Image (cartoon, rainbow, N blue to C red):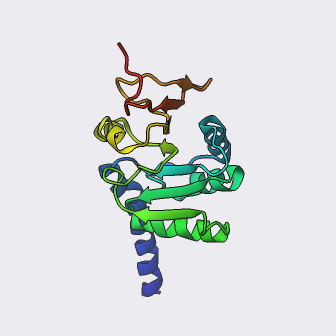
C-alpha cells in the first residue's frame, strides 16, 4: 500500500512540474481546445509543403493538426522533457513521425531559419524576450502567428474577429511593420 501512495504522490509532483516549471521558461502549459487549434490553422493560411514551427509546442497537438490538415511539415521545440515525450507519443500515434520533429530545447536559441510559419502561444514576457532578436533568424517571407498576446511595438497584418490571433508578415528587410 505504501508503494501505491508513493506512486500517487510522484504522479502529482510530476503533474505540478508540468504546469509550474515552464512558467519560469516562457509560458505555462494551457492546452487548447480542438476548435481553437482549427482556428489557428485556418488563420495561419498554411499551404501544402510549408514548414510550420511551434515554439513552445507543449503536447504537439497544434503541430499534428497543421501537418495532418494542411500537408505541412511540423517542427516543434519544447523545454519540458515530459511534454517532449508526450508530444512524440502523440505524433507517433498519429502516424506523422516522418512529417513532424519535436526537439527539446529553448525557444530563444532555436533555429527558425527554414520556417514558413512560426506559431507562438507565449506570455508577454516571453514574447518581449524573443522579439525583435528572432527577426534576424527568420527568412524574409515568414509569417508569425501569435495566440492571445500580440507582439509589442509591432503592427499585425491581420487580427481575427475575437482579437486573440495576430498574424505578422516579415518583409524582405527582415522586420515587421512597426507602429509609427
Nearer to us in this view, 48 or 75: 48
Residue at 35% of width from left, 23% of height from top? 153
Q: Position of residue 139 (x, y in %)?
A: 43, 42
Q: Position of residue 159 (x, y in %)?
A: 55, 25
Residue at 48% of width from left, 82% of height from top? 4
Residue at 34% of width from left, 50% of height from top? 23
Residue 55 in the image: above or below residue 103: above
Say whether residue 19 is left or right of residue 143: left
Residue at the outermost top position: 180
Q: Position of residue 110 (x, y in %)?
A: 36, 54
Residue 140 in the image: above or below residue 52: above
Residue 83 appears in the figure: no
- In what quadrant of the picture does the C terminus appear? top left
Residue 63 in the image: above or below residue 41: below
Image quadrant in which you'd find residue 127: top left
Residue 37 in the image: above or below residue 175: below
Nearer to us in this view, 39 or 47: 47
Image quadrant in which you'd find residue 98: bottom right
Image quadrant in which you'd find residue 132: top left
Number of marks in the rendered image: 0
Residue at the outermost right position: 69
Residue 125 appears in the figure: yes
Say whether residue 72 is left or right of residue 167: right
Residue at 39% of width from left, 62% of height from top? 80
Q: Position of residue 71 (x, y in %)?
A: 68, 53
Amino acid at each position: 500500500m505504501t508503494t501505491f501512495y508513493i506512486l500517487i504522490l510522484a504522479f502529482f509532483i510530476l503533474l505540478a512540474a508540468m504546469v509550474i516549471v515552464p512558467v519560469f521558461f516562457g509560458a505555462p502549459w494551457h492546452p487548447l481546445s480542438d476548435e481553437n487549434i482549427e482556428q489557428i490553422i485556418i488563420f495561419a493560411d498554411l499551404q501544402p509543403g510549408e514548414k510550420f514551427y511551434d515554439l513552445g509546442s507543449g503536447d504537439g497537438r497544434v503541430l499534428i493538426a497543421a501537418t495532418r490538415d494542411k500537408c505541412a511539415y511540423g517542427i516543434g521545440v519544447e523545454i519540458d522533457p515530459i511534454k517532449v515525450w508526450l508530444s512524440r507519443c502523440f505524433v507517433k500515434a498519429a502516424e506523422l513521425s516522418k512529417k513532424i520533429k519535436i526537439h527539446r530545447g529553448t525557444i530563444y536559441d532555436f533555429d527558425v531559419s527554414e520556417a514558413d510559419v512560426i506559431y507562438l502561444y507565449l506570455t508577454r514576457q516571453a514574447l518581449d524576450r524573443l522579439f525583435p532578436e528572432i527577426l534576424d533568424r527568420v527568412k524574409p517571407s515568414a509569417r508569425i502567428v501569435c495566440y492571445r498576446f500580440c507582439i509589442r511595438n509591432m503592427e499585425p497584418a491581420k487580427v481575427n474577429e475575437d482579437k486573440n490571433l495576430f498574424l505578422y508578415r516579415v518583409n524582405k528587410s527582415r522586420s515587421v511593420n512597426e507602429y509609427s
